[in-house]
Image: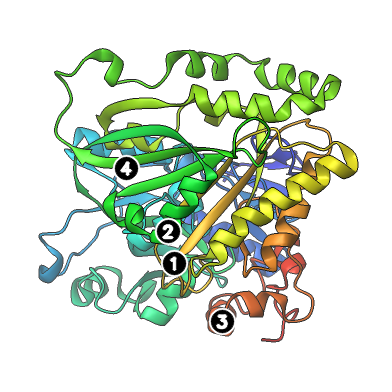
Amino acid sequence: MQFEVRKTWKNHLGNQRIDPLRIYEPRSIAEVQEVVRLARARGVNVRAVGSGHSWSDVALTEGFVLKPTGMTRVPAAEPDFIRSEWAGRKLVRAEGGARIRECNAWLDASGMGFENLGGYDGQTIAGVTATSTHGSGMRFGPLNDALRSLDVVVGDGSVQRIEPSGGPTDRAAFEAHFGDRRALVQDDHVFNAVCVGIGCTGVICTAMIEVRDRFFMREVREMHPWAKVRRDLEDGAVLERHEHYELAFSPYDDGYAYPFLVTTRDTVGDPRNRPWDKRMRNWLVELAALFPYTPHIINLILDVRPALAPALLRGSIKALVKDRYDEVSFKVFNIGNANILPAYSCEIGVPMDGRHIEAVEAVFRVARERRELGQVYQSSPIALRFVKTSPAYLSMMNGRDTMMIELIGLNGNDGGIELLKAYEEALYALGGRPHWGHLNTLSGSGDFVASMYPRLADWLDVRAALDPDGVFDAPFTKRVGLSRGSFVA
C-alpha cells in the first residue's frame, strides 16, 4: 500500500495542521487492518480523518493518518446478513469515507432520504457520527442515533461488527461467512460507546443507517425580538408544533431588541408545480456568500468601524427572512452557500431545564462586556439548535434534551477567538458540554470531563477493551484526559 511521508495534513480552514509520520489512503477494510497492525507493532498512533471539517484538534496525530478517500462507496460492498425481523426497514450501509452529499445523492435516486440532517453535507458519515453532529428538532436525536451497525477495525487490527442488542445482523449467517475472521458484537453497552467514539475506539469502515422514504419540506424564516422568542421557548409549544425549529441571532440590542431569525421546517407534499421563487432561498444572500472577498470586506469594516457590528448582524439576519422555501428534504436541511465562508466555530450544548434561557442571556452579557472592555465584536450570527436526548455515552445530548449554541466567527476577525473562549467559560457554568468537532479549550484536569459526562467511566471501559495499547491516542485525547492511563474516572 502506498503512503506519503511527513506531508502536512490540515483541515479545511487551515487552523489545524500536523506533519504525521505517514499518510495512508486505504481502499478496503483489509488495508485499514494492515495500517493499524503496523502502527501497533511499531508503537505509533493512528488517527482516521474525515473530510477535515472539524475546527478542533480531534483529528490530529503525530503517527499515521488514514484518509478516507478510497472508502467512499454507497452502498458499501460489505454483506449485511439482515435478520428477518429487520427485513422491512429502510437500511443503507455506507463506507465511512462517504460524505453526506454522496449519501444524499444515492438515497434520493433510490427514493429515500435521511430522517434528519445538519446544515452541511461535506462531512463524512464516520466523522458526523463519531462527533455526534446534529440537526435541530426535539423529535430527533443527533445523527449517531440513526446508526444501526458499524464495521470497526479496533486496536489490535481485528474487525468487529458492533451493533445494539437485537441488531440487524443475523449471527448464524455472519459467522458462517466470516468464521473467526470477524466478530459480531451485539451489545448496547459497547454500541453506545463506539457510536460516538471520537476516533478513540477504532476506525469506522462502514456504517449502517436507518433512513425513510423520500420526502419534501417547507422552510419558513421570520424575524422576531428576543422577548417573543423567550416566551415561545419558555412555553415550549413551538418546539412541539414544528418538526424542526432553530434560531440565529445577534447578541446586541442596538436599534432592535436582540434580533432573532426563527426558522421552522415541516413536511409538505411535492412542490414541483409551485412558483420557482418558492423553491429557492434568497438569491442575493447566496450570491454574496459565493463572493470570495465577502468575509474580508466584513472584517475590514469591523477593523475600521467596529461599532457597526450590531447593524451588520441585524442586516444579515433580516436578509435571510423568507416566507416559504419548499424542496426535497436534504436541500432544505442544508443551509446553503453560507457553508463555504471561511469561518470557525465553538459549539456548546446546555440542558433544556431552564438553563437554556439563562445561556442565551449569558451570551448577551459576554458580548456586551467584551464590547465595553476591548471593542471586540461578534462577526457572525449565533445559532441555536434543539436536539433530543441520546443514549450515546459521549454525545453532548447524553441523558438530556439539549440546546446547542453555535458561536461562529469569521476567520481573521480581531479578538474573535478570545470572544469564543469567554462564551465557552460562561456556558460551562450552566452545564455546557462542548461539541467534539468544534473549537474548545476543554481540559482533562481534575474531574471536569467526568462532571460533564456521567457515563464516562462506561465509555472508558469500552475504550480500554477495544484499544488496550492506546493505538488511537492523540494530542486531543491527552488534552481532554481520554488517553490510556491519563484519566481516573
Mark 1 falls on what kind of element?
loop
Mark 4 falls on what kind of element?
loop
- Mark 3 Cα shell of 10 Å, populated few (<14), some (14-19), many (≥20): some
**Rendering quarter of residue 262:** top left
Distance between the alpha carbons at the discs numbered 3 and 4: 36 Å
For the point 37% across and 79% down, which residue is it? Answer: 188
Query: Which amino acid type is shown beneath numbered disc 2?
Result: Val
* On-image quarter of the C terminus: bottom right
Q: Residue 129 vs residue 217: left or right? A: right
**Residue under label 3:** 454
Disc nearer the start of the sequence (4/1): 4
Disc 3 + disc 4, Cβ < 8 Å: no
**Residue under label 2:** 387
Residue 198 visible (yes or no)? no
Disc nearer the start of the sequence (1/2): 2
Distance between the alpha carbons at the discs numbered 2 and 3: 19 Å
Disc nearer the start of the sequence (3/4): 4
For the point 52% across and 80% down, which residue is it? Answer: 462
Where does the image place residue 424, in percent across and percent down from the top left? 71, 57
Residue 105 visible (yes or no)? yes
Q: Nearer the viewer, mark 3 or mark 4?
A: 3
**Residue under label 4:** 74
Distance between the alpha carbons at the discs numbered 1 and 2: 6 Å
Question: Looking at the image, is 282 positioned above or below residue 390?
Answer: above
Query: Which amino acid type is shown beneath numbered disc 1?
Result: Asp
**Residue under label 1:** 401
- Mark 1 Cα shell of 10 Å, populated few (<14), some (14-19), many (≥20): many
Query: Which amino acid type is shown beneath numbered disc 4?
Result: Val
- Mark 4 Cα shell of 10 Å, populated few (<14), some (14-19), many (≥20): many
Disc 1 + disc 2, Cβ < 8 Å: yes
